[in-house]
Image (cartoon, rainbow, N blue to C red):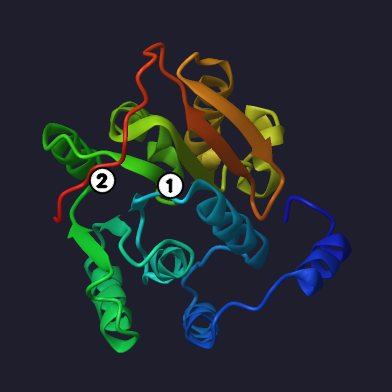
Amino acid sequence: MVIDERLSVYINSLLWDIPEYLQETEKNAIAEGVPVIKRSTQTLLAFLLRMAKPSAVLEIGTAIGFSAMLASEYTSPGAIIDTIEKVPARIKNAKENFKKFNKENRINLIEGDANKVLWQLVSQEKRYGFIFMDAAKGQYMNFAEPVYKLLVTGGMLVTDNVLQDGDVLQSRYAVTRRDRTIHSRMREYLYYLSHSEEWDTIILPVGDGVAVSVRQDSSSRMETDYVSKW
């Protein structure tokens, strides 16, 4: 936990309750040891979606479908929600949840490795107003270029788990050897987001750390979301 546990509990007590079906999904995920975004991150994501009002959303890292279903609650009924997942067991669970909670027509599950799928979406000239990245942390930097191309100018990228439960603050040699590669890659990613002219970024100590970035562009012409059905 990035912030003090008592403060986190107090803040969570002030937050709204997610719909019952999401509470059920969250409870089952925790019981099975499947990670879902923390309650404070849920609140932030919902707030940003309501504010941005995107007509097309892309999620990188479906897991069991919790975040995609959350996004479906805070976007317009006509908004497209695409989500990418490569792990067969999680694909199966996500499909089951989408069917169980009548989300099959709202959420498009794209199966495959995000490194390949993202470039496929770029080649298809798809555009999104909002991208939520919650996948393998060591891959974030690899996703950065296609993600930038997929976002419309002024579009929002929300990246979860960027502070790695506080480990990113430590020296490379203060973290365990097996985590050093991820530690270095995350620091590189955060430096890129905060120093590149391509992004306007704020890093928030919410959950395990969230980076909120807005795509910058020198063009004076603002793009609009456009994504055809997958």
Q: Nearer the viewer, residue 150 or 145?
A: 150
23 left or right of 221? Answer: right
Dot placed on the residue nearer the N-terminal end, 1 or 2: 2
Mark yes or no: residue 176 visible: no
Vertical comparison of 119 with 49: above or below:
above
Q: CA distance from mark 1 to mark 2?
A: 10 Å
Q: Position of residue 151 (x, y in %)?
A: 35, 34
Q: Position of residue 14 (x, y in %)?
A: 80, 70
Tag shown at residue 114: 2
Q: Residue shown at 50%/23% (left/top)?
A: 199
Q: Which residue is mark 1?
A: 133
Residue type beneath disc 1 = Met
33 left or right of 146? Answer: right
Q: Residue shown at 41%/17% (left/top)?
A: 217
Q: Quadrant of residue 148?
A: top left
Q: Position of residue 84 (x, y in %)?
A: 27, 55
